[in-house]
Image (cartoon, helix red, strand yellow):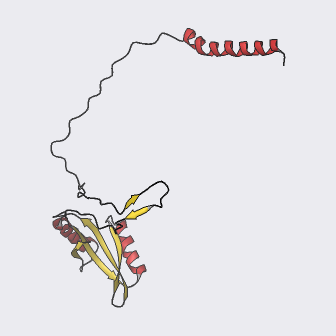
Amino acid sequence: MEQALKQRLIGAVILISLAVIFVPMLIGGKPGDNEVVSIDIPELPKELESRIIALPEQTMEPLAKVSLSKGQPVKITSPSIAKPPLSNAVEGISAWVVQVGSFSDKKNAKGLSDQLKKAGFTAFVEQSAGKKGEIYRVRVGPELSEKQAGLIKLKLQQEQKLAKALVVQYP
């Protein structure tokens, strides 16, 4: 390319970029005053009812010490198997469920569970090993209070005609 053509192209690019930058400033309106926006943030409730439980504190120990030296192989000293983390037991937390049936056939348990779900209960099937094979227990809940689980048991006995429902601690 000729030198004059290169200079014209560079000049055109510079003029176009300046136009892109300054033309919107000239055409646009004046920027408004800085408006102050205030937001009212409500205070925290004094008694916050929450089901969130704080996790116990845990301590970590190193598994091994590794030393590196130039020209030397990597040395690993005092390797150890990690011990379970120390934790403080959380006391007083228990859940309760209403057991409404126990089946050896998964289809029967699933059918009863679906029927209870359609009726508005929080039903689930729990599988466990028994003496004669797998057992499928249909349970409703869990609830944090035994009293609430008892009320659900009465409701199941009256509405769903499940006379042998019983309240058990879960898990």
Rendered residue at 72%/12% (across/down): 11
Rendered residue at 36%/75% (across/down): 112
Q: Residue furthest right?
A: 2
Q: Is residue 160 above or below residue 134?
A: above
In front: 110, or 120?
110
In front: 127, or 83?
83
Q: Is residue 121 left or right of residue 24?
A: left
Q: Residue furthest front?
A: 71
Q: Quadrant of residue 164?
A: bottom left
- In percent of width and height, residue 92 lies at 15, 64
Q: How many dots with numbers?
A: 0
Q: Is residue 137 above or below residue 1?
A: below
Q: Is residue 8 left or right of residue 123?
A: right
Q: Quadrant of residue 37?
A: top left
Q: Is residue 78 left or right of residue 1?
A: left
Question: Which of the image's four quarters has the N terminus?
Answer: top right
In front: 69, or 64?
69
Question: Which of the image's four quarters has the C terminus?
Answer: bottom left
In front: 132, or 158?
132
- In percent of width and height, residue 140 lies at 29, 70
